[in-house]
Image (cartoon, rainbow, N blue to C red):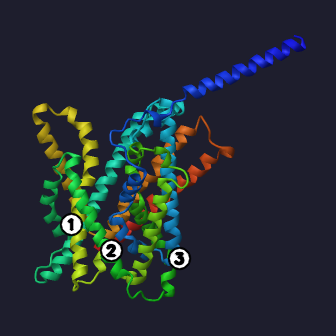
Amino acid sequence: MDLNELGEYQTRSTITLAREDQLERDNKYDPFEHRNVTHPTSTVGAFFHLLKSSLGSGLLAMPAAFKHIGVIPGVIGTALVALIATHCVHILVSTSRALCEESRVASLSYAETCEKAFKHGPKRIKRFSTHIRHFADFAMAGVCLGGTSVYVIFIASSLKDICDHFYPSHVYSVKTYCGFLLIPLILTSQIRHLKFLVPFSLLANLCLLVTFLITCYYTFQDIPSVEPEKLAVGITQWPLFLSTAIFAMEGINVVMPVENEMANPKRFLGCPGVLNVTMVFVATLYGVVGLFGFLKYGDEAQGSVTLNLPQDEIPAMVAKILVAVAVFFTYCLQMYAPLDILWIRIHSYISGTYQNLGQIILRTLCVVLTVTLAIAVPDLELLIGLVGAIFFSTLGLLIPVVVQTAHCWDRNLGPYLVVVWKNTLLLLFYLLVLVSGCYASITEMVAKFS
């Protein structure tokens, strides 16, 4: 081959490669362009949806969380938990988007992302794709059922506090109030369509907002000086802080629906991005409420700071009533997801004649389960720690880490296997939260109830 032929060959090769690159770009699937959402959510709307998922009863539990760790470790720990929770959401959404491109689908749910990650992952784990989907679904159901058990205790504790004040001659235990709630909760859980729950959601949000404002009014008044023993607490109590903080801040169960329905999903990740802005705001709010609530009430801080409000003042009593109403109506909203997951799996085994009866029985049994768990652990603070350690850490930490590792294993693990090392540290953190949180919660339960 002479020099002229060599030059022509190189020119043709360059043109061919350029055409192949252009063809690859033209054939690259962009899931955002294929999303056909009937009523897309604006960027501001996505921010408020994500904010609502992270703000709730957990916010009122942060002063009790700080009680187990102290001021300085509490502030650092809140920032650390927020950072880890944000990162896990980030890797879940990033993996879901990559899988959408590979599978050429517009969007994937949380469970579908888990299944696709294993299907497109190493050969050894492909056969587990269906199992990981079921595991993700049941983890989601566990989060919702565990969270609603906390709600039962939350409502029962508030009702006891209110009734003990107005009817001091009729004092009942928290367990008794849990029993009183059984029938009303069964009735509200029979609502099967999400659109009928919208008024309850609006009422719950309004009640929570007013409760939060009244609580801040009391919390930020007459704050005592910082005592040395409040700066840090013995390390044996730290696991209860971690599991409570994870319970409070984890809203990963609504992340994929919010991202999938955005009008401009490219604004979800990145800097500033909806996710980062929301979590910075959430971490700041949780840190402020936890810090000043702990400085105000110290070791007396209860599982909900509203229980620390005075009983002889009208605004405080209004806050206690409103938070009970808000959590009561939030209960049926939180039960929607696990009931839907369970019904999808069992409805095919029930004949058409008994479909309605089957729905009623399933919903009743799930409510009975949550009330039974609340009666078994009638302590709001300890139940939050236990549920956070088991369910919320699994859904928010373990599954995103496993999904990203499975997807990147045969593709790109980064320089020096950075993905493997980083996810190993996250996995160790998950195990720390799971084991130590369960141990600390159960030990406290045994000591308290024995």
Q: Label 3, on which residue?
A: 72
Q: Residue at x 47, y 54 (%)?
A: 275
Kindly tell me whether residue 330 is visible in this rendering: no
Q: Label 1, on which residue?
A: 325
Label 2: few (<14), some or many (≥20) within 10 Å?
A: few
Camera-nearest residue between 438 and 8: 8
Residue type of the residue flagged with mark 2: Leu
Residue type of the residue flagged with mark 3: Ile
Q: Quadrant of the N terminus?
A: top right
Distance in Å between CA atoms under marks 1 and 3: 34 Å
From this view, report whether residue 116 is shown above or below residue 175: above
- Number of marks in the image? 3
Closest to the camera, between mark 3 and mark 2, is 2
Q: Quadrant of residue 278?
A: bottom left
Closest to the camera, between mark 1 and mark 2, is 2
Distance in Å between CA atoms under marks 1 and 2: 16 Å
Residue type of the residue flagged with mark 1: Val
Q: Is residue 49 left or right of residue 79?
A: left
Of callouts 3 and 2, the N-terminal one: 3
Q: Residue at x 27, y 58 (%)?
A: 148
Horizontal and vertical percent position of residue 353: 9, 33
Distance in Å between CA atoms under marks 3 and 2: 25 Å
As helix, strand or loop, the secondary structure at mark 1 comes to: helix
